[in-house]
Image (cartoon, grey):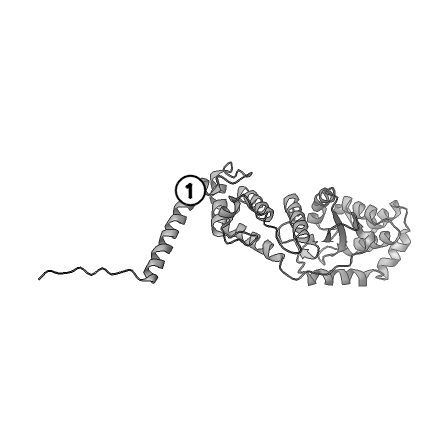
Amino acid sequence: MPTTQRIVEPSPVKLLVVAVLALSSAAQAQSADPRRVLADIPGLDFTRLAPPAQKELAAVFTDEFDYCGKPLTVAAALKKPDACKHTRRLAVYAAGSASEGEASTEIINQLSRYNESFKLKRVAFKPDERQCKGPKDAKVTVVEFSDFECPYCNAARPLVEQLLKRGDVRVCWQPFPLSQHPAAMPAATAALLARDAGKFWAMHDALFDHQLSLNEQSIAGLVKGLGLDEKAFAKAYAEKKYDAEITASKELGKQGNVDATPSFFFNGRKLTFHPSADSLALSLDDELDWVGNKNGWASN
């Protein structure tokens, strides 16, 4: 009696498993060749990076999805002609981080925190115009919480000046004196005293210029050097004239999760990246796009 062979159709679950395994194998093969992942991106050439940086960047591009919300990996989104500017900016920033030796996991964490910050509730600031630079009608207001004895705040000064040259941003200073800096409070007092006399920015610059020698006596000398009454400064500091204002500024900063100085907020959104020329420029460009797109990302 002849036998018949029964043809068994694979189950949908088995087909799905096979498909997933195939995709996984393809992804692993591609990730083994970072140059393939990074090649053919219009207007951006990441293949010039050193091989270790290429490897980390390729891992970011294949593990992360498009930052503007498309159902594509970053690598796939970047190769589309309509790749959004936000994703392209973050890709360039990630490349810089990879070239500095950062691991893909850390880069992914930083980019995710930054991207998520646009969706979080923003802090409402009402800065004193006398502590601001830039056009009042600028689309983006950057609030900086700063301490005159903080070396990182001093290092951020040229970065802020560079940002202001864009012309479409206003920068406002807020006091955030740290308890470990003994001259921070008298310095903040001198800055606000000078503000009331119309000389805030002159005092701001003088205090940072003499950061390494700040104490109550030297600050009084800076006050006098600007043509202000040093006795008025001594009285204001002794009587804690500005302490309530300074405390209120610090409390406002804490509401926005200020945990270090300097801290920057773009229209009330905290900059989660370490302050640098690149991160400040990136955040400004992104904020302008976000505002111009009614709190969303344009497709291109």
Residue at the disc numbered 1: 33
Total number of numbered labels? 1
112 on left or right of 125: left
- Residue furthest out toward the top: 48
Q: Residue 23: percent from the left, percent from the top?
A: 39, 52
Q: Residue 175: percent from the left, percent from the top?
A: 76, 56
What amino acid type is highlighted by mark number 1?
Answer: Asp
Q: Quadrant of residue 109?
A: bottom right
Q: Quadrant of residue 36?
A: top left
Which quarter of the rendering shows the N terminus? bottom left
Is disc 1 surrounded by few (<14), some (14 to 19) or many (20+) residues within 10 Å? few
Residue for point 83% across, 46% down: 202
Q: Nearer the viewer, residue 72 or 31?
A: 72
Query: Taking the image as drawn, is residue 103 in sight?
Result: no
189 on left or right of 289: right
In what element is the residue under mark 1? loop
Residue for point 81% across, 47% down: 201
Q: Residue 170: percent from the left, percent from the top?
A: 76, 49
43 on left or right of 166: left
Q: Residue 228: percent from the left, percent from the top?
A: 90, 49
Q: Nearer the viewer, residue 270 or 149?
A: 270
Q: Nearer the viewer, residue 73 or 122?
A: 73
On screen, 269 above or below 99? below
Q: Nearer the viewer, residue 223 or 153?
A: 153
- Residue furthest out toward the left: 1
Query: Taking the image as drawn, is residue 231 in sight?
Result: yes
Residue for point 85% across, 50% down: 220
